[in-house]
Image (cartoon, helix red, strand yellow):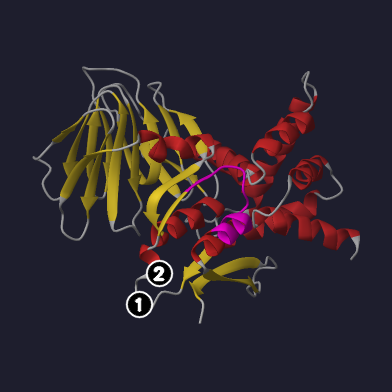
Amino acid sequence: MDKSENIVSLIEKYLNNTCNPEELARMIQLFQSDEHKEQLRMLLFEYWQHSPSNRHKIREDELNQMLDSIHHQINLEQKAKQPILRKFYQYAQRAAAVLFIPLLLASVWMFYQNTNHATSGQYITLETPMGSKLKTVLPDGTEVWQNGGTTLQYPSQFTQRNREVILTGEAYFHVSSDKKHPFEVKTTDGIITVTGTRFNVSAFPDDDHSSVVLEEGKVYFAPANNLEKKLEMNPNEQVIYRKQSGSLTKQIVDVDKYTAWTEGKLIFRNDPLEEVITRLSRWYNTEIELKDPTGKLGKHPFTMTIQNETLPQVLEYVSNAAGFRLEQYTISPQQSSSMTRTKYVISRHN
């Protein structure tokens, strides 16, 4: 295998979340190198265009601007007291599966989205690709952590009198307190109204339910089918909205289970396998199929905490713990792409 093939293999390993810390550090070196800049640009452009989590396509010139910004930022970090490679390596030791490049791309894409819409009078859209996270601070000081596969929209003229956002996916909010001007999070399933608090909202279109978990303060949830009915929530409570029936359930929960993702952890406590697989697919940006013709396999409960593990390690544990069969396939690149992807299939042993 020549040097060029080694680089392609390294990038594909990275995008499939199978890099170790040394390989992640090598990725930073590739970004610093002008020699491989064109190769990186082409591969990342293909990845961005063909990733199912990216709803909007970008032009090549826009990607070039993003990569130049990333390259410039790395050079600035190099001049700091602590070299970026050392800092990155230390971080990678704690989280070997961290998605560094997609996060940078998401951050820079956010910058261009803001620039393009700042005076348009429309909504600013922030998107996070599957497998990455993004933190941003809104003009009123509210902090928002977006999970992978999430879209957040807010008015370009975001003011104290107009504190509202539209969410698709999952996000954790630390809302800046302002009792005179409530903050609203709108989803397709309802509206969350707060004045100053910390809470997590999960509202993925493909899920059969959405939920709100309150960590601190007080919020009100009004379901989309009855906006006049506002349900008050107190700390450590979760409200679940069932989409098919339109029913609401409120219960006491362990808040850490629903907010730990902001710190790079996934916590499962007697969660059914079908829910585990859904979250893992989004977390690692990888297709995982559950072959479950009887519907019993998906109900199998799992308790575990994931932090530094790679997806193969997690799935190996899941399959061994429950005696399931795990298969791994390499998906050939599409005609318009040279990137291969990995697919996992979980089923019962014959």
Q: Please state, as top left, top right, bottom left or bottom right, where the N terminus lies in the image.
A: bottom right
Q: Examine the rendered structure and indicate whether residue 252 appears above or below residue 303.
A: above
The reply to whether callout 1 and callout 2 are in contact (CB within 8 Å) is yes
Nearest the camera: 240 or 162? 240
Q: Amino acid at mark 1?
A: Thr
Image point (44%, 58%), residue name: 278
Marker disc for residue 128: none
Q: Where does the image place residue 236, in percent across and percent down from the top left? A: 29, 31
Label 2 CA crowd tier, 10 Å (few <14, some 14–19, many 20+): some
Q: Examine the rendered structure and indicate whether residue 340 appears above or below residue 64.
A: below
Q: Amino acid at mark 2?
A: Leu
Label 1 CA crowd tier, 10 Å (few <14, some 14–19, many 20+): few
Residue at the extreme left of the image, as rendered: 228
Q: Where does the image place residue 332, in percent across and percent down from the top left? A: 66, 74
Kindly indicate the quadrant of the structure image that contains residue 302. bottom left
Nearest the camera: 14 or 267? 267
Q: Which residue is mark 2?
A: 297
Determine whether, in the image, residue 287 is placed left or right of residue 308. Answer: left
Q: Examine the rendered structure and indicate whether residue 266 appears above or below residue 40.
A: above
Q: Secondary structure at mark 2?
A: helix
* Residue extent of the magenta highlight: 304-317
Q: Where does the image place residue 184, in percent across and percent down from the top left? A: 26, 33
Q: Which residue is mark 1?
A: 294
Nearest the camera: 57 or 318? 318
